[in-house]
Image (cartoon, grey):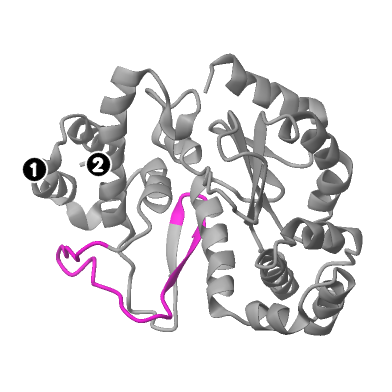
Amino acid sequence: MTREANIATQEKAAQHLNAGDIDAFVDTLFAPDCVDHDPAPGHVALAYTLSRQAVPSRECSGRWPTPSGPDRHLAVTGSEVSESTTHPNRRRRVWLGGLIALVVLAVLGAVSATSGTGSAGQAGAVGADPGTQARLAAARRIPGDPLALGRPDAPVVISEWGDFQCPFCRAYTLNTEPSLVRQYVDSGRVRVEWHDFAYLGPESELAARAARAAGRQGRFWQYHDALYRQQGRENSGAVTDASLTATARSLGLDLARFQRDYADPAIAAQVSDDRELGAALGVTGVPSFVIGGQMIVGAEPLATFHQAIDAVGDHGR
């Protein structure tokens, strides 16, 4: 079976899926040629966005063994998915997670058809391709989220992926974001949600962890801005435990708590998870922004954001 036929089979099966058909759906996707099966990139993205939990193992000719251990994680680039682990013989069951995502999409499609609204409360979900569906589902909308600016129920969510060592991210933060916040966030029309894409080197990861530690004290955005203002050359040795603690001190943070949170493995996992999610959605460089299912890449001028925000607003929430 060709790749195109496989994708068509997935979509056809999803259209007729109900709660009692999951086993049959699995058989449809993985038989008879499951050894060579290659799910659509959009469905991989949906697996990350809509289903972050593992599902029971289903093996096919030994192709999909069950991974185990806390050291397992995925390194994703574009539509390619590879295992990054200290046990190279293990593979993670990404494709099965995609099945759950497609189940969710089938339910969302039924709901959207009757309600006339899109996924995640934004326009364009009905009939959209899986990649767009996944980007629409990226908005967290969590009340009290320290990594977000604006109302959780704002009509438009801008999901930003950035790296604290990226000079283009710095340009956006210092030159474009303040106007965006004044014009759209303060008025309640837009919500901005930060995601880490710490890919430029180890100092990027240190800075990302430190900013999240500051976020636990309600000072993420102040720390975020300070990191960009004092940004040096990439991986020059300027970002260290000591320099990050000094920044926390300058912002009046509780240093003992900051250092404890900075070393918390849960924060490191969140940084890694954000990068994986971004990659699954198509982020390959920073800054990148998802607005209403549209991807904007680079430190674009304010007018570009105006157009994307207005496009979402023109279709309603």
Q: Please, what is the three-letter code of the amino acid marked with disc 1?
A: Gly
Which residue position is annotated with label 2?
A: 103
Disc 1 secondary structure class: helix
For residue 74: magenta? yes
Name which residue lies at 10% across and 49% down. Answer: 23
User: For this view, does 275 lie left or right of residue 57?
Assistant: right
Q: Nearer the viewer, residue 292 or 223?
A: 223
At a point 49% along the width and 36% down the height, the residue shown is 136
Name the residue located 70 percent from the left edge and 61 percent from the top edge. Answer: 218
Expressed as whole percent of the image width and height from the top left, the position of residue 121 reads 47, 30
The one nearer the camera, 272 or 114, is 114
What range of the chain is rendered magenta?
55-80
Which of 223/56 is in front? 223
Alpha-carbon span between mark 1 and mark 2: 11 Å
| x and y, in percent, of residue 44 in the image | 38, 49
Chief SS of the magenta region: loop
Q: Which residue is mark 1?
A: 20
Whether residue 286 appears in magenta in the rendering, the answer is no
